[in-house]
């Protein structure tokens, strides 16, 4: 048996034995496409089109204004927040859905630093997703005595040893959006707490992909998007978690009327609602929000530990394919081999990443890239198969060996 | 001919002669319902369900991540912004759609006061919609030397005579959300400018209901929602206008990555995009945003001056009905009789406003109320008829005369 056949056999066996295989039926995936970009935009859950059609035709079209009560629109941010809470280890009443991740980051970082007013430093990751860095700067810029320090997670302990007593909050993501590297949330949260600071986590690349334990780790605040592993659709509303112990003192910067204790009393002054409801801002985009709610039904009866085990099996298998097929071709995996240090995507380095991504798309394999030289292969254990990953690896290998790609393609639109 | 017959004849004649009557076909309105709450939630435009079904099934389901370019998702906030711009007298490139009105107010008020850093006062209306007041306070709270002053529009000139040189910005709405009173945008904007301050307008209750002239009046910043007279659906994305002359200096507080000059370069620091694109924040809720875009097609070939003329005819007629039918019943109109001082809703005062609103709903007339004692009848000249208004008035008159309503009903849900 040659190497290729061995990989094919291994993939077929893993897929045949996969207890989660039937979950793929919960998605509408286009024929002939291997979709490995669910870490950027999750595919369409089959539950969404009928649910959204009902929201539009019956709830909006017929129910009209009455649907704010009768169809539960008003409560949707808290109800959907609780559903997301179950996926991230948060007991009910601590999570709210709505707005974009950027707006939620502004809220989380403002609120976290306001809880430590005597501490002047806000720590973020120099490798953090851009909006996390930009919003940290935005929060600091508006505070009198607040300064951002960009410290890689690996250097946090050392930094806190020197400066810990001056740190208000530490804002990290467990998964590096470029390399797919997973850091140790528990250890970093604990180190942050030892310094008396608050831990703020961005779970965009983690929620829905693995078990998370916000309550158990005593995380202070967290945010995440709705459109990656939660599959809520393009630009789906984001979410914010704030631990219950902080609610009474939680000082949010965007005091929109939806977060008022008595929104319809139209009071003269803002009085924050009790609990996580005070983190509501304005009227949320109900169509997008209820599409997200329908999308979250794909997680019903799904064991996140089992989902994570399959995700690890998939990324492990893809890294094996990469070693066997790509090593001679100058394509280098940058994602850790150690499963405990790996999220749910695998990144490969090649100088012609954009051209290769385009050539793969032309051959039915959808991935994305991060400039200048990273190819990202996102796996989602809800629908990705080992065989798909092998096919993707084989197609990439053929493309590189045959040089059948444009090494410097023109950009075809604003989104790369 | 008795008074009732005269009103019926007048309504029938006005409707028969109405050149805009065919526009009602652009909406899906439930049978047997007289919907007079479009000033709170616009009804479903017929163009929305097929457009949204296509966005979900084809653009998201089949196009997947590629639709950010191929279906124009990335450009949607600016494209839809320009479509809204045409309704508010804004040349292209000055309006962006996205986020909630509350978030846009935070941006507008922050940016306006940042443009006048040497002036310590932010003027808002004590009768402004709550979120406008709360966000003004939120902006002031974060600035070192910024203070909110609540000055009614009628007192602005006098206030500016004393304090004008200390005022950074004036934030008003042309339409009072309770009484429906319309103020003089041109005069107030001019007075604001004479003082060297910036004019920020909240057009939630005006955009789509009447011609507006943001460029011609040299308004500085404006915001509005997408779900009232724009009919974009529950919680439809809001919008922000910033006059082109301010773009280069426009300092937005929420520096999300979508507003970056090169969002996909993932730069270390935030560099604002040129033009109004810098007011983008995070990834927008595409399903809600493209539903709004489909909804805006109802305005194609609609002359806003003609729409306003019909709106005035409708509110004038309803006030006449009110005088004839309600005066003996203790229901008092609070909306000005002078059409030039009236927006597109009529408010009536009665101590049992909530009970009457419920009783009307039970009889197929949907209005809303504002605590404690205002009944709001919103007319939308795109679909409301004079005959509907007479029927609504007759039903209310019968309900009050027969006392066939609950004077103190229990609240049936969070939204009153």
Image (spheres, coloured by chain):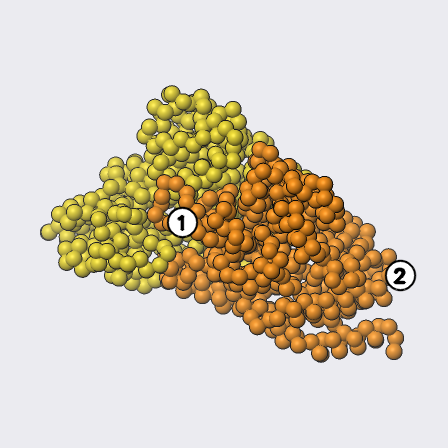
Chain colours: A orange, B yellow
Q: Quadrant of residue A39?
A: bottom right
Tag shown at residue A261: 1
| Real-space Cα separation, disc 2 to disc 1, in angstroms | 63 Å
Tag shown at residue B245: none
Q: In this view, does A137 lie to the left or right of B287?
A: right
> What is the chain letter for disc 2?
A
Q: Which residue is drawn at 52% across and 50% down?
A: A246
Q: In this view, does A404 lie to the left or right of A136?
A: right
- The crowding category of the residue bearing disc 2, from other C-alpha atoms within 10 Å (few below 14, some 14 to 19, many at least 20), is few
- The crowding category of the residue bearing disc 1, from other C-alpha atoms within 10 Å (few below 14, some 14 to 19, many at least 20), is some
> What is the chain letter for disc 1?
A
Q: Where is residue A60 in the image (x, y as percent from the top left)?
A: 41, 60
Q: In which quarter of the image is residue B362?
A: bottom left
Could you confirm whether marks 2 and 1 are on the same chain? yes
Q: Circle 2 sits in a helix, a strand or a loop, which is it?
A: helix
Q: Is residue B294 visible?
A: no
Q: Position of residue A170 (x, y in %)?
A: 64, 46
Is B324 above or below relative to B152? below
Q: Can residue B351 be seen in this view?
A: yes
Q: Circle 1 sits in a helix, a strand or a loop, which is it?
A: loop
Q: Residue at x 24, y 39 (%)?
A: B337
Is A50 above or below relative to B243? below
**What residue does disc 2 label?**
A328
Q: Which residue is drawn at 36% across and 43% down?
A: A267
Q: Residue at x 41, y 43 (%)?
A: A270
Q: Earlier in the sequence, mark 2 or mark 1?
A: 1
The quadrant of the rendering that contains the C terminus of chain B is: bottom left
Q: In which quarter of the image is residue B58?
A: bottom right
Spot the residue most to the left: B1
């Amino acid at each position: 048996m040659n190497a290729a056949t061995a990989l094919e056999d291994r993939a077929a066996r893993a897929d045949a034995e996969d207890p989660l295989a039937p979950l793929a039926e919960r998605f509408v995936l286009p024929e002939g496409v291997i979709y490995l970009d669910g870490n950027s935009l999750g595919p369409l859950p089959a539950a969404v089109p009928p649910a959204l059609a009902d929201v539009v035709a019956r709830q909006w079209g017929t129910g009209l204004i009455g649907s704010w009560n009768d169809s539960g629109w008003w409560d949707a941010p808290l109800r959907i927040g609780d559903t997301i809470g179950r996926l991230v280890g948060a007991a009910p009443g601590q999570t709210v859905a709505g707005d974009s991740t950027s707006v939620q980051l502004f809220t989380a970082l403002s609120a976290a630093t306001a809880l430590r007013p005597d501490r002047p430093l806000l720590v973020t990751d120099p490798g953090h997703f851009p909006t996390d860095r930009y919003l940290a700067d935005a929060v600091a810029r508006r505070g009198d005595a607040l300064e951002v320090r960009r410290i890689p997670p690996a250097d946090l302990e050392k930094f806190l040893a020197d400066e810990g007593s001056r740190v208000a909050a530490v804002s990290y993501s467990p998964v590096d959006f470029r390399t797919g590297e997973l850091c140790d949330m528990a250890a970093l949260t604990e180190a942050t707490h030892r310094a008396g600071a608050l831990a703020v986590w961005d779970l965009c690349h983690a929620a829905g992909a693995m078990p998370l334990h916000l309550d158990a780790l005593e995380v202070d605040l967290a945010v995440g998007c709705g459109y990656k592993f939660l599959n809520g659709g393009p630009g789906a509303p984001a979410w914010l978690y704030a631990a219950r112990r902080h609610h009474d003192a939680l000082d949010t910067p965007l005091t929109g009327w939806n977060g008022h204790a008595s929104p319809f009393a139209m009071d003269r002054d803002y009085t924050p609602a009790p609990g996580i409801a005070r983190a509501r801002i304005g009227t949320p985009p109900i169509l997008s929000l209820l599409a997200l709610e329908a999308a979250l039904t794909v997680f019903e009866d799904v064991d996140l530990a089992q989902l994570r085990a399959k995700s690890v099996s998939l990324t492990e298998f893809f890294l094996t394919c990469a070693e066997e097929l790509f090593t001679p071709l100058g394509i280098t995996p940058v994602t850790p081999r150690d499963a405990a240090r790996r999220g749910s995507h695998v990144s490969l380095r090649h100088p012609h990443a954009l051209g290769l991504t385009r050539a793969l798309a032309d051959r039915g394999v959808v991935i994305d890239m991060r400039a200048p030289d990273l190819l990202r292969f996102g796996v989602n254990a809800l629908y990705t198969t080992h065989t798909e990953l092998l096919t993707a690896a084989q197609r990439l290998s053929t493309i590189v060996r045959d040089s059948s790609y444009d090494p410097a393609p023109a950009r075809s639109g604003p989104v790369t």
